[in-house]
Amino acid sequence: MTPVELSRTVLRAVRCAVDVGELSVSVPTSAVVTPPGPGGCGDYATNIALRLAGPAGRPAPEVAEILRPYIARDPGVADVTVTGPGFLNITLAGGALADLVEVVLEQGTRYGYGDTLAGQVVELRVPYDARAEIVADALVRIVATQGGRVEVRHLEPVNLRPVPAPEDPAPLGHDAARWALLHPAPHDQPRISADHLLQRENNPLFRVRYAHARTRALRRNAAALGYTGAPLREVRPAGRSRVLAGAGAGAGAGAATGVGAGAGVGLGVGGPGDARRAGVPPRTAGSPLVGPTPAEVDRLLGPTPAESDLLTALAEYPHALRLAARHRAPDRLARHLVVTADAVLGFQHSVLPLGDEKPSAAHRARLALAEAAGTVLAGGLSLLGISAPEHL
């Protein structure tokens, strides 16, 4: 289940509560779903109860308790908890985070597109200024991702006037010049400097493009080792979803893994079909029964902090894209790409096997996640009009 799908689940819950007379409110057109904040729990949280408390004439915790069972009955939801002043904290059912990676890989660079601005025509009246022109150009594509259309005009009164650049950014080259003008907030003066060209970690543009190139290099290196990545759904005992991957290169390449619900971890290999679905070679007569190593069992119990950071960045990308379109702010997208890139760079070293280690289900999982991250980075850079190199 993706954040967009979960948002629809929340809205359906409101509609159900209204239909049966438990709430007397207008059903909102959108519901914000984000990772839980301090004091929260689960995979995602929504403030929908706080938004509806006033119109409903009830305390937010009471509204949340009304909505809780309607959200919980969705098959993609494992648990719903009310915390704080009325936040609904949602734990996804098994495979929900795997769904996120799968959706990114299936939708490609169109991941995050929506209909928030469907049918709307946005008129941007801009001055004859390099930065305003570049911002408007990026907004044409960003607004289109949400179903809207931009018309750029050079008319008064101007309604898009970011702080102009202090000097001509053209000597930086196409990509660095665009980043220099798009990354700062509109009210901040852009910094036109050769620092944007440096291949150093303190250069945000370099980190974003380097992170994309690293995801593509990991895919090439994994192919050379004879394996690929693809999402596979598993559930850890605590109930939180995690991402694995199956489908190794060749017929039935991989490793057997199984996670049982409840107190323990169940390991084993069933028939040949089960083995292939789990990403393992069928067991032949006389061959030993092979399960995951103790290290792999530990890995199956939940995402590492680095994986969680990257999953969160991918899940928040559609929201960042909507905000960039709604507020006419490409800088919001640029900053989220930096967050995603930093998560990739903190995660990348766990993707490939080390030394004599053989590719396992965990490696395939990480590769699928890395490929999804590369897709998001490529899509975001393209919307900003900046290239995403395969090699850097």
Image (cartoon, helix red, strand yellow):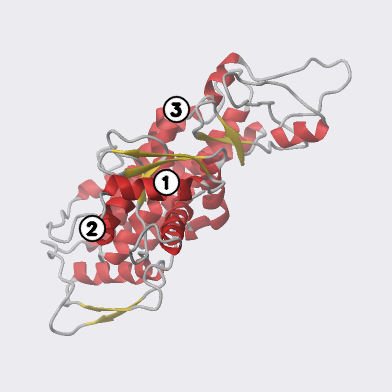
**Rendered residue at 31%/68% (across/down):** 139
Report if residue 299 is visible in the image. yes
- Determine the secondary structure under disc 3: loop
Residue behind mark 3? 304
Spot occupied by residue 241 in the image (x, y as percentages of width and height): 52, 36
x and y percentages locating residue 377 in the rendered image: 42, 50
Vertical relation: 152 (above or below) 191: below
* In front of the other: 50 or 260: 50
Sooner in the amino-acid sequence: mark 1 or mark 2: 2
Q: Element under label 1? A: helix
Q: Nearer the viewer, mark 3 or mark 2?
A: 2
Where disc 2 sits, the SS reads: helix
Q: Report crowding for label 2: few under 14, some 14 to 19, many 20 or more residues within 10 A (C-alpha).
A: few
Query: Where residue 288 sits in the image (x, y, percent)?
Result: 79, 15
Residue at horizontal 82%, vertical 24%? 283
Please give the residue where the numbered disc 1 appears in the rendered image.
Answer: 68
Residue under label 2: 54
Amino acid found under the numbered disc labelled 1: Arg
Cα separation, mark 3 vs mark 1, equals 29 Å
Q: Return the disc, 3 or 1, that comes first in the chain's sequence.
A: 1
> Left or right of 364: which side holds 24?
left
For the point 68% across and 38% down, the residue is 247
**Label 3 CA crowd tier, 10 Å (few <14, some 14–19, many 20+):** few
The kind of residue tagged 3 is: Thr
Q: CA distance from mark 3 to mark 2?
A: 40 Å
**Does residue 265 appear to the left or right of 134 in the view shown?**
right
